[in-house]
């Protein structure tokens, strides 16, 4: 990695050191669940290199750097340091980025197939559509993971939202599926076997709005890359705008392309 791109190595090394420092801090404070998260993050840092070696691919340095930053932002800052709770929009930003990056992965898979096969010639529109669908599938599968974690592990990954209005047929006393609107909710009292809980400010929506918001921003990220990738292919692989140049820097290529051209995308070596 040092030989290929010093800037990427500095990003990688810095983030690994930060994760190790966080791991030590969690061990000292005996936060064992967060220790496991740190170990998972260190393992995830190895995945790009394993993918490159296993499939003879070249992941652009810019893409690898974004992957490392994404892992650190999601696992360490988000989970361990509670940025999901303390910083509004942190989860939204990561889901948007996830939609964009997953679309780049989906686009790259078919783009590689298109270039390496003489019998397959997929249209730019088809490439963009599959990239979009791939990204949305990844987003939906992740929401399945969050829901399963909440149901079976009590993790509350689908964060709750305070709402002041609900519309429900379950409140219809006649059970005729008439919608009953309850608006202006200022306080909710929950009677449980272990006590009474008071929710100030409204009614507690248990994850539905958070899930739909995550899927919507994933949709926006996937759509953005699909459009950029489509325009890039239509232009014959020549990036004519800043957005197309970004898409080109995120496309995974065969390892032979790098060896033959001697060029790499992403930050230039020092």
Image (cartoon, helix red, strand yellow):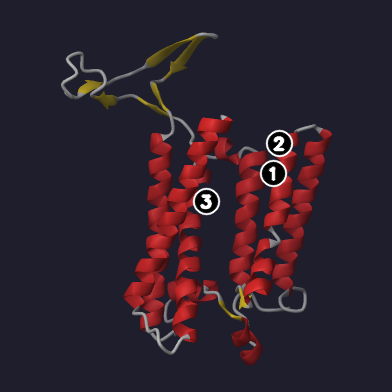
Residue 105 screen position, x and y as percent? 50, 67
Q: Nearer the viewer, residue 48 or 220?
A: 48
Please tell me which of labels 1 and 3 falls first in the chain: 1
Q: Nearer the viewer, residue 103 or 151?
A: 151
> How far apart, in angstroms, are the residues tagged by discs 1 and 2?
7 Å
**Label 1, residues with CA under 10 Å away: few <14, some 14-19, many ≥20:** some
Residue 64 screen position, x and y as percent? 63, 66
Is there a contact, CB below 8 Å, between mark 1 and mark 2?
yes
Is there a contact, CB below 8 Å, between mark 3 and mark 2?
no
> How far apart, in angstroms, are the residues tagged by discs 1 and 3?
17 Å
Position of 143 with respect to 223 (left or right) is right
Q: Is residue 20 above or below residue 114?
A: above
Determine the residue positioned at 30% across, 25% down.
165
Q: Is residue 247 above or below residue 68?
A: below
The residue beneath circle 3 is 94
**Label 3, residues with CA under 10 Å away: few <14, some 14-19, many ≥20:** many
| Element on which disc 1 rests | helix
């Amino acid at each position: 990695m040092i030989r290929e791109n010093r800037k990427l190595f500095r990003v990688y090394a810095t983030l690994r050191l930060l994760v190790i420092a966080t791991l030590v801090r969690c061990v000292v404070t005996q936060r064992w669940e967060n220790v496991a998260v740190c170990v998972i993050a260190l393992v995830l840092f190895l995945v790009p290199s394993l993918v490159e070696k296993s499939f003879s691919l070249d992941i652009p340095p810019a893409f690898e750097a974004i992957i490392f930053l994404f892992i650190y932002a999601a696992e360490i800052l988000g989970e361990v340091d509670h940025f999901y709770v303390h910083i509004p929009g942190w989860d939204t930003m990561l889901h948007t980025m996830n939609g964009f990056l997953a679309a780049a992965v989906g686009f790259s898979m078919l783009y590689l197939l298109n270039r390496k096969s003489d019998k397959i010639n997929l249209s730019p529109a088809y490439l963009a559509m599959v990239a979009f669908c791939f990204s949305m599938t990844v987003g939906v599968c992740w929401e399945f993971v969050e829901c399963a974690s909440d149901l079976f592990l009590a993790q509350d990954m689908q964060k709750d939202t305070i709402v002041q209005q609900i519309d429900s047929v379950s409140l219809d006393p006649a059970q005729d599926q008439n919608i009953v609107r309850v608006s202006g909710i200022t306080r909710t009292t929950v009677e449980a076997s272990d006590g009474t809980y008071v929710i100030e400010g409204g009614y507690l929506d248990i994850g539905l709005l958070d899930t739909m918001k995550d899927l919507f921003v994933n949709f926006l990220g996937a759509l953005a890359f699909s459009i950029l990738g489509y325009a890039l292919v239509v232009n014959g692989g020549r990036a004519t705008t800043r957005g197309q140049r970004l898409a080109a820097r995120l496309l995974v290529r065969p390892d032979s392309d790098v060896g033959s051209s001697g060029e790499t995308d992403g930050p230039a070596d020092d």
